[in-house]
Image: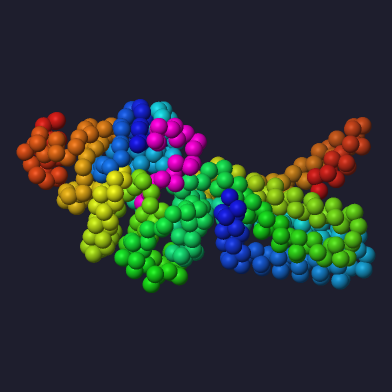
């Protein structure tokens, strides 16, 4: 399984998109921290970037990568490898590669500028988001045989989770503002962000 | 060596295999023939557990292959259409499979040398022609000295010289007492290779005979003629 994971990671690194992704995240975080004197304000702006771009890249890249690995998977199933080993190697390869570039692009600058519990929480949640969205991407790739439908479904899921869901929460919050459970909503909203 | 018991498989509404039972023993060179879409490839894929049958069990050396993988170390498989990761080179693909198999014996590089693949070593799989891809598939199938060889349309797409090399190699491996399972539509090619013939039609095995029995029964000396004669009799 280690061998297959290694091949997956080398393959991902070779297509260079992951390097560009790292670079873009780097540019984001460095420019935000050097423009903003107040680091907690800076981390708030960075959080918005993380909440929108990181899931989008993870889900789209992961999804397309799974479709492109069809031949690779087909080659491996005829060899003495367990199916679960193939699948988990792909998952491990993708999450490791995307999390590493997240850590280099955002984690390191955050640790440099905001070396506090808040900074670590931001990094941790960003990595968790990456992992979760890679998992969703892989699920979409299994559910849909057709590539275009699979990618469409993953875009829909991204759209729902990063925009529509928040909108719904806000909508219900204002709708039910007159009711006493109102005090519960801000904390729920906070946890979704 | 390989035993199939009441294997059935359907893909949606199409039945690919209907209650197939077969016993394939070592030292034989079996030709699996039949019209298109009669379930040949599905049968091969279920032996490799690339397809999981709906019903029935398959035994390899007496062991149920369900959820097993180690038995595949003894099988060399050459697919009908080899699909490989596009941006890997021939060398990388072979190295990766070496890595997975962790085979400790001496590798059989005879085909690799005979096909002259070292000249293409660094070429990416997507740039290869269909024939060269077939050569890679054949090389990988024979590379680890497996005791069972499963060749799905081995000579389709190969040039005459290459298919001659492959034929010689198959005959050589047969002499070593390996079990060889070949599917092909080019019956004339199979003449001096086979020891047994399995004929499939509409997801079922119609007959399973040794080649001498087949010739005796039909008074023919060529596989293609014998089969067409036998099929007329059945009808």
Give the left or right position of residue B121, taking residue A109 as reference: left
Percent x, y of residue A185: 87, 39
Instruction: Say which of B166 and B40 sits in front.
Output: B166
Percent x, y of residue B31: 24, 43
Give the left or right position of residue A10, taking residue A180 as reference: left
How many callouts does the rendering have? 0
Bounds of the magenta segment: B59-79
Instruction: Say which of A66 and A82 sits in front.
Output: A82
Instruction: Specify whether residue B202 is in view.
Output: yes
Percent x, y of residue A36: 89, 68
Instruction: Specify whether residue B12 is in view.
Output: no
Q: Residue at x 84, y 62 (%)?
A: A110
Q: Coloured how?
A: rainbow
Percent x, y of residue B176: 29, 49
Give the left or right position of residue A78, taking residue A65 as reference: left
Instruction: Say which of B97 and B15 sits in front.
Output: B97
Q: Residue at x 65, y 46 (%)?
A: A135
Q: Is residue A43 above or below residue A139?
A: below
Q: Residue at x 40, y 36 (%)?
A: B60
The residue furthest left is B219
Is residue A52 highlighted in magenta?
Answer: no
Is residue B73 highlighted in magenta?
Answer: yes
Q: Is residue A129 above or below residue A40?
A: above
Q: Residue at x 25, y 49 (%)?
A: B175
Instruction: Say which of A25 and A11 sits in front.
Output: A11
């Amino acid at each position: 399984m280690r061998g297959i994971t290694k091949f997956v990671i080398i393959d991902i690194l070779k297509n260079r998109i992951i390097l560009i992704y790292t670079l873009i995240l780097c540019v984001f975080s460095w420019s935000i921290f050097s423009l903003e004197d107040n680091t907690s304000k800076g981390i708030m702006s960075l959080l918005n970037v993380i909440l929108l771009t990181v899931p989008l890249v993870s889900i789209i890249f992961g999804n397309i990568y799974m479709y492109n690995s069809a031949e690779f998977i087909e080659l491996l199933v005829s060899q003495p490898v367990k199916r679960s080993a193939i699948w988990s190697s792909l998952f491990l390869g993708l999450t490791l590669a995307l999390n590493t570039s997240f850590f280099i692009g955002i984690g390191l600058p955050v640790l440099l500028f905001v070396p506090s519990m808040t900074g670590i929480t931001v990094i941790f949640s960003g990595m968790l988001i990456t992992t979760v969205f890679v998992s969703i991407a892989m699920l979409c790739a299994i559910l849909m045989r057709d590539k275009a439908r699979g990618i469409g479904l993953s875009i829909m899921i991204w759209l729902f989770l990063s925009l529509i869901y928040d909108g719904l929460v806000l909508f219900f919050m204002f709708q039910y503002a007159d009711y006493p459970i109102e005090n519960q909503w801000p904390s729920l909203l906070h946890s979704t962000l | 060596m390989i035993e199939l018991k009441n294997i059935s498989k359907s893909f949606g509404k199409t039945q690919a295999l209907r209650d197939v039972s077969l016993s394939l023993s070592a030292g034989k060179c079996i030709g699996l023939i039949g019209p298109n879409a009669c379930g040949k490839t599905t049968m091969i894929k279920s032996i490799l557990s690339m397809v999981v049958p709906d019903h029935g069990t398959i035994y390899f050396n007496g062991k149920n292959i369900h959820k097993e993988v180690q038995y595949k170390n003894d099988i060399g498989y050459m697919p009908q259409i080899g699909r490989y990761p596009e941006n890997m080179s021939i060398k990388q693909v072979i190295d990766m499979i070496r890595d997975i198999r962790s085979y400790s014996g001496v590798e059989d590089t005879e085909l690799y040398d005979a096909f002259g693949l070292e000249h293409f070593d660094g070429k990416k799989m997507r740039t290869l022609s269909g024939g060269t891809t077939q050569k890679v598939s054949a090389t990988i199938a024979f590379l680890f000295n497996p005791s069972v060889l499963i060749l799905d349309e081995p000579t389709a797409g190969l040039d005459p010289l290459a298919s001659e090399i492959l034929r010689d190699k198959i005959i050589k491996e047969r002499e070593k007492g390996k079990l060889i399972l070949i599917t092909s539509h080019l019956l004339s090619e199979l003449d001096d290779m086979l020891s047994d013939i399995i004929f499939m039609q509409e997801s079922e095995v119609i007959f399973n005979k040794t080649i001498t029995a087949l010739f005796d029964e039909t008074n023919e000396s060529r596989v293609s003629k014998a089969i067409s004669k036998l099929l007329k009799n059945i009808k």
